[in-house]
Image (cartoon, grey):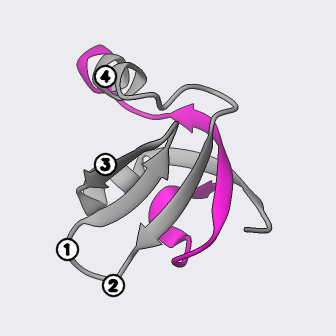
Amino acid sequence: MVPLAKLNPGETGLIGSLEGGHHFVSRLAALGFTTGAPVTVIRNYGSGPILVSIRGAQIALGRGEAGRIKVHCSEG
């Protein structure tokens, strides 16, 4: 598994795990970041927020947040 922050635009991964406290995990789960959910990176410039698509919604994540979301890579 790799951090979501490492994926390039257009790449898709399956959520493997969320690393963090209860509040962080609960908030992301409410946004649709649950184990096995496919997530696609829309924008990742290498600095600043990362824009992803998950369950039909586009969500901006901070780099720290995206680094704590581990994904199984797949071709996108």
Location of residue 23 (image quadrant): top left
Residue at 55% from the left image edge and 25% from the top image edge:
34
Mark 3, residues whose alpha carbon is within 10 Å: few (<14), some, or many (≥20)?
some
Residue appearing at x 58%, y 33% in the figure: 17
Instruction: Identify the residue under disc 2.
Output: 45
Q: Amino acid at mark 3?
A: Glu
Pointer 4 or 3: first along the chain: 4
Distance, label 4 to label 3, CA atoms, is 12 Å
Compared with 29, 11 (above or below) is below
Label 4 vs 1, first from the N-terminus: 4
- Residue numbers of the magenta segment: 1-24
Residue type of the residue flagged with mark 2: Tyr
Q: Element at badge 2? A: loop
How far is the residue under mark 3 from the one under mark 1?
12 Å
Side of 2 relative to 61 (left or right): right
**Numbered label attached to residue 58:** none
Element at label 1: loop
Location of residue 64 by image quarter: bottom left
